[in-house]
């Protein structure tokens, strides 16, 4: 297979695993072939041979109802790709001042080629002592790159990055800025999440919660 076609196939493979991994955490229905194709902007026929290859590699399974499920191996790969995307996106939006949409597009382009070591170093740099407001985050710990929407009730978290630039000032006023410890009080399926910040309970929409990156404290 020519190198360019191989790289495109590899990127699509990772995009599929990332999309299924993300759907598993957010509860979004993307587990059917047609819905997955719509999410990725592809035709179902483009995805089918890649999905078959992923099944043969032991990274996903076709369920009797037509849905797709990740195996532990596929789950690991999907999580790794999503983590790369999140850290790159955070770097572009927070540190380079790009808009969230542009930052996400750039992250999609680079996430397939960047090494795990580079991501680890970039993650440590983003939350290093050179940035104001980040001294509460532990250095040397692997950044899990969760969004607030993916947390569960009772989680004690530390805000790592706020990606919704238009609402950044308002969220800062509420105490939601990098380095702040928060607790997930309640999740409202489809309607948002309630978090506790400095003894105050704050309700956030699903869109805003998905734009706040966190790591587990402790």
Image (tube, rainbow, N blue to C red):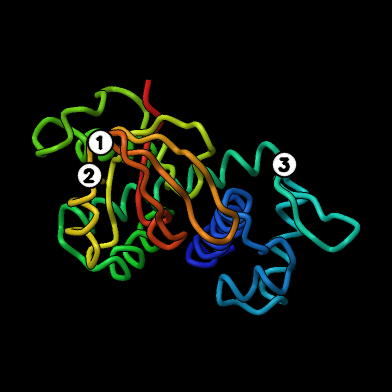
Q: Residue tagged by mark 1? A: 180
Say if 137 sits above or below 8 in the image. above
Q: Earlier in the sequence, mark 1 or mark 2?
A: 2
- Residue sitting at 35 percent across and 59 percent down? 107
- Residue sitting at 71 percent across and 52 percent down? 54
Asked if disc 3 and disc 1 are in contact, CB closer than 8 Å, the reply is no
Q: Earlier in the sequence, mark 2 or mark 3?
A: 3
Displayed quadrant of residue 197? top left
Left or right: 138 in relation to 130: right
Asked if disc 1 and disc 2 are in contact, CB closer than 8 Å, the reply is yes
Q: Position of residue 83 (x, y in %)?
A: 43, 45
| Residue 37, numbered label | none
Q: Residues within 10 Å of mark 3 (few under 14, many from 20)?
A: some
Q: Residue tagged by mark 3? A: 71
How far apart are labels 3 and 1 at the CA level?
35 Å
Q: Position of residue 78 (x, y in %)?
A: 56, 47
Q: Position of residue 121 (x, y in %)?
A: 26, 34
Q: Residues within 10 Å of mark 2 (few under 14, many from 20)?
A: some
Front of the two marks 1 and 2:
2
Foreground: 104 or 196? 196
Foreground: 70 or 199? 199
**Residue sticking out furthest to the right:** 64
Q: Residue tagged by mark 2? A: 175
- Residue sitting at 43 percent across and 56 percent down? 210
Q: Position of residue 56 (x, y in %)?
A: 78, 49
Say if 108 sits above or below 202 in the image. below
How far apart are labels 2 and 3 at the CA level?
39 Å
Foreground: 60 or 149? 149
Count all numbered tags in the image, as a single digit. Answer: 3
């Amino acid at each position: 297979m020519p190198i360019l076609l191989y790289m495109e196939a590899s990127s699509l493979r990772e995009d599929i695993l990332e999309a299924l991994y993300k759907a598993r955490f957010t509860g979004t229905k993307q587990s059917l072939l047609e819905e997955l194709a719509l999410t990725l902007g592809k035709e179902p026929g483009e995805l089918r041979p890649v999905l078959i290859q992923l099944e043969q590699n032991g990274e996903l399974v076709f369920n009797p109802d037509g849905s797709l499920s990740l195996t532990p191996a596929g789950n690991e790969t999907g999580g790794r790709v999503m983590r790369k995307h999140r850290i790159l996106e955070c770097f572009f939006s927070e540190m380079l001042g790009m808009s969230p949409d542009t930052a996400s597009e750039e992250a999609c382009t680079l996430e397939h080629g960047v090494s795990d070591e580079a991501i680890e170093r970039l993650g440590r740099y983003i939350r290093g002592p050179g940035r104001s407001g980040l001294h509460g985050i532990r250095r040397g710990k692997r950044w899990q790159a969760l969004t607030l929407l993916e947390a569960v009730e009772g989680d004690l978290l530390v805000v790592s990055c706020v990606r919704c630039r238009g609402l950044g000032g308002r969220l800062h006023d509420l105490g939601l800025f990098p380095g702040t410890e928060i607790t997930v009080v309640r999740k409202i399926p489809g309607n948002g999440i309630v978090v506790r910040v400095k003894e105050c309970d704050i309700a956030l929409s699903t869109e805003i919660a998905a734009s706040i990156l966190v790591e587990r404290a402790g």
